[in-house]
Image: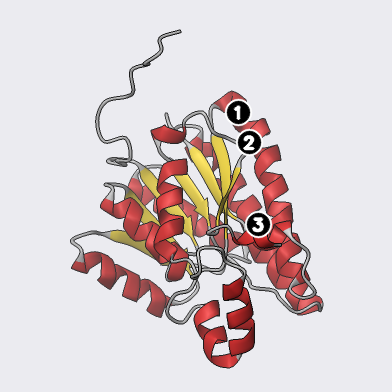
Amino acid sequence: MDPAPHLPAGPRLAFTGRRVLIAGGSKGIGRAMALAFASAGARVSVCARGEAGLAALRADAGALGLAVHTASADLSQLDDIGRWLADAAQKLGGIDVLVNNATGYGMADDEAGWEASLNVDLMAAVRASRLALPWLQQSSDACILHLASIAAQQPRPGGAPYAAAKAALMHYTTSQALALAPQRIRVNAIAPGSIEFEDGLWARRREQDPELYRNTLAKIPFGRFGEPAAIANAALFLCSPLAAWITGHTLNVDGGQVLMG
C-alpha cells in the first residue's frame, strides 16, 4: 500500500452546484447550517413553520451575498413535507443532501409531549427521507443527515419523549444507512450537546431556570455551551467528500458533555 496516498485535489469542503435541503432551519442550528452550506456554494432550501424566522434567514443570507430558498411547512404533516420537497427540488434542480433538523421539543411525559417528539423528531425525518428518495437516487453524491441528541445516550429523569425519539432516530440512521448503501446513498447523524443561541432553549433556561443552566454547564468538560456553528461545521464534513467512506455513524458534537454522564 502507498504509505502516502494521494488526496483529492481542490477545496474538498466546497459544495458548488450541490442541492441541499434543510428541514427545520430558520434559527439556531438550522440557520447556521443553511448559511454554512450556502457559503460553501450550495443551493439551499429551508423549511420551517414560522414565516418570520424564514424572512430573517433570507435577510441574513442576503447580507452575506447569498440566496436561500425558503418555504413554510408544518413538518408534523405529511402533505406539507411533500409540497416542500417537490417545490424545493423544482427550484434547485434536484436534491443531493437532505438534512432533517426539526424538533418538536416534546419534554413533558404526556400525550402532547410524546406526539410532538414522535411526529416531528422521528416521523418527519422518516417521511422526508422516503419522499426525497427519488431525487436522491438521481444524485451522483447523495447523503442524508439526521440531527439526533446526546440526550438519547444517557437516561434522565425528565424529557423522556424527546430522548426516546432521538434514540429511535439514531437507530433509524443505522438501518437506513444499511438499506441505502447499495444505492451509494450515505446516511449519518449528529448528536449535539447543549447548544446556546439567542431565543434558544438554553438561552431561555439561563433566565428561567439558572440552577439547571449552571448544573448543565458544570457537566461540559470544555467549560462552555456549544454554538450552532460547531454543528454546522460537522454537518459540512459529514456531507462532503471528506466523509465519503462514512455511513451509519452518529457523531457526538458536545465538547465531551456525554462523557460526564
Q: 58 left or right of 48?
A: left
Under tag 3, what secondary structure? helix
Residue 237 drawn at (x, y percent): 42, 43
In contact (CB < 8 Å): disc 2 and disc 1: yes
Cα separation, mark 2 vs mark 3, equals: 26 Å
Quadrant for the C terminus, please.
bottom right
Q: 207 left or right of 111?
A: left
Instruction: Give the vertical position of 72 relative to 3 (above or below).
Output: below
Most foreground residue, 207 or 25: 207
Cα separation, mark 3 vs mark 1, equals: 31 Å
The earlier-in-sequence mark between 3 and 1 is 1
Q: Which residue is mark 2?
A: 177
Dot 1 amino acid type = Ala
Q: Which colour assignment does the render follow?
A: secondary structure
Frontmost of labels 3 and 1 is: 3
Dot 3 amino acid type = Leu
Q: Which residue is mark 1?
A: 181
Dot 2 amino acid type = Ala
Under tag 2, what secondary structure? helix
Residue occupying the point 50% across, 63% down: 222
**Any mark on residue 259, and which?**
3
Residue 74 drawn at (x, y percent): 56, 69
Residue occupying the point 72% across, 56% down: 153
Residue occupying the point 72% across, 46% down: 171
Most foreground residue, 144 or 190: 190
At label 3, counting other C-alpha atoms closer than 10 Å, the crowd grade (few under 14, some 14-19, many 20 or more) is: few
Residue 15 drawn at (x, y percent): 32, 42
Q: Quadrant of residue 82?
A: bottom right
Residue 161 drawn at (x, y percent): 76, 69
At label 1, counting other C-alpha atoms closer than 10 Å, the crowd grade (few under 14, some 14-19, many 20 or more) is: few
